[in-house]
Image (cartoon, rainbow, N blue to C red):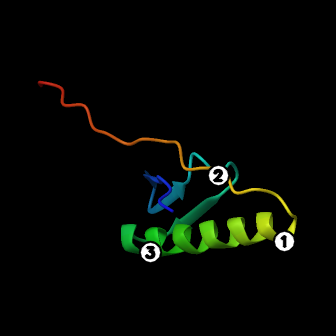
Amino acid sequence: MRYAIVIEQAGSNYSAYAPDLPGCVATGNSIADVEARIREAIVFHLDGLREDGLPWPPPNSQVDYVEIAA
């Protein structure tokens, strides 16, 4: 499965979340760090849903960029 993630700079570090998995967030000191941590957080989140007998939410979010002329 492929879940979209959003990475934002948060002062001196980075934060990330998965829009299709409410509450699934991570922080890190670099983009590479936060990517690794959000991947771990997603696995942990999905494992928790499985243990609780709940279905995994399907990945529905789409990511794209919009170019704006300056």
| Amino acid identity at mark 1 | Glu
Is 16 placed left or right of 44 in the picture? left
23, above or below 50, in the image = above
The local crowd at label 1, few if under 14, some if 14 to 19, many if 20 or more residues have their Cα within 10 Å, is few
If the image is split into quadrants, where does the C terminus sit?
top left
Number of numbered discs on residues: 3
| Amino acid identity at mark 3 | Asp
Q: CA distance from mark 2 to mark 1?
A: 16 Å
Q: Residue at x 66, y 50 (%)?
A: 57
Label 1 element class: helix
63, above or below 70, in the image = below
Q: Which residue is mark 3?
A: 33
Q: Hey, which residue is sitting farthest top in the picture?
A: 69
Label 2 element class: loop
20, above or below 30, in the image = above
Q: Nearer the viewer, mark 2 or mark 3?
A: 2
**Which of disc 1 and disc 2 is earlier in sequence?**
2
Q: Could you tell me if the residues under marks 2 and 3 are in contact, i.e. CB atoms within 8 Å? A: no
Q: CA distance from mark 1 to mark 3?
A: 27 Å
Q: Residue at x 47, y 68 (%)?
A: 34
Q: Could you tell me if the residues under marks 2 and 1 are in contact, i.e. CB atoms within 8 Å? A: no
Q: Nearer the viewer, mark 2 or mark 1?
A: 1
Q: Could you tell me if the residues under marks 1 and 3 are in contact, i.e. CB atoms within 8 Å? A: no
Q: CA distance from mark 2 to mark 3?
A: 20 Å
Q: Nearer the viewer, mark 1 or mark 3?
A: 1
Give coordinates of residue 30: x percent, y percent: 40, 70
The dot on residue 21 is 2
Give coordinates of residue 24: x percent, y percent: 65, 57
The dot on residue 51 is 1
Quarter of the figure with residue 25: bottom right
Is 25 placed left or right of 69 in the picture? right
